[in-house]
Image (spheres, rainbow, N blue to C red):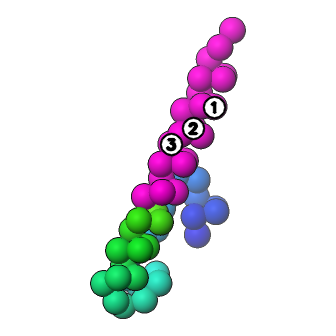
Amino acid sequence: MEKDLPGFFYAGNHKGGLSVGKAIASGCKAADLVISYLESSHQKLLKDASP
């Protein structure tokens, strides 16, 4: 789903399993993806804005 919707990140126990550990791991992975997405978007904006 995330591949078709750039900037949308899906996490939680319903994605990878019912345990608390899997829900936390899913949230951490989603957070890493969000950080990477924002960093790459920021770099693209800077590149596009330079003369």
**Range of the magenta residues?**
31-51
At mark 1, the secondary structure is: helix
Residue 42 at x, y = what percent?
54, 33
Q: Earlier in the sequence, mark 3 or mark 1?
A: 3
Residue 28 at x, y = what percent?
41, 65
Q: Is residue 41 left or right of residue 23?
A: right
CB contact under 8 Å: marks 1 and 2 = yes
Q: Is residue 36 above or below residue 1?
A: above
Which residue matches tag 2?
Answer: 41
Q: How would you rate the neighbour count of disc 1 (Cα within 10 Å): few for under 14, some for 14-19, many for 20 or more?
A: few
- Considering the whole magenta stretch, tell me its main secondary structure: helix
Amino acid of disc 2: Ser
The answer for how far apart the CA atoms under marks 3 and 1 are is: 10 Å
Residue 44 is tagged as 1
CB contact under 8 Å: marks 2 and 3 = yes
Q: Is residue 29 left or right of residue 1?
A: left
Which residue matches tag 3?
Answer: 38
Q: Residue furthest top?
A: 51
